[in-house]
Image (cartoon, rainbow, N blue to C red):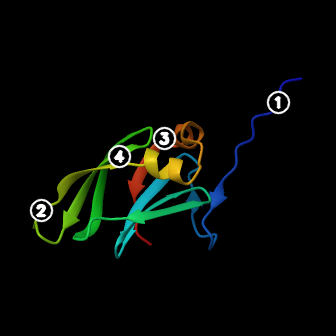
Amino acid sequence: MSPKHVDYVVYDKNFKEPISIEEAYLSNDKDYTIFRYADYIIRFQAPYSLEKYTEVKEWNKGYLVVMAKYAHNTEPEEEYIDLVPVLETLYIDVDEFVDKIKKVSVKYE
């Protein structure tokens, strides 16, 4: 007997909108970059002059290419974020974690 495929939807903590189980979200708050996926909220030091992330251009198994707006420049700049060392420091299985994520979007709450 083969296992049944079960589709399910995860809702945000206020049960307002469904959360994709294949999508992660990037934002920042003050001096921290915030990466949210499923039940994980990972915060790490952001560049001092970062105002906000404006776009995720590429997600590649833990490596992000993003556009970021900095205080010292009027236009967004291309920036690179490598989550692998952050995940390793937190003792998170990198391959298992990043393989589930198909898309990363900028999302501020």
Q: Quadrant of residue 97?
A: top right
Residue contact between numbered discs 1 and 2, judged by CB atoms under 8 Å: no
Q: What's under tag 1, amino acid-wise?
A: Pro
Residue at x 21% of width, y 64% of height: 69
Residue of label 3: 102
Q: Residues within 10 Å of mark 1 (few under 14, many from 20)?
A: few
Residue of label 1: 3
Residue contact between numbered discs 2 and 4, judged by CB atoms under 8 Å: no
Q: Looking at the image, is mark 2 or mark 3 earlier in the sequence?
A: 2
Between marks 2 and 3, how big is the CA–CA gap?
A: 28 Å
Q: Position of residue 20 (x, y in %)?
A: 56, 52
1 vs 4, front mark: 4
Q: Which residue extends farthest top?
A: 1
Q: Position of residue 59 (x, y in %)?
A: 38, 42
Residue contact between numbered discs 3 and 4, judged by CB atoms under 8 Å: no
Residue of label 4: 64
Q: Is residue 82 visible?
A: yes
Residue of label 2: 75
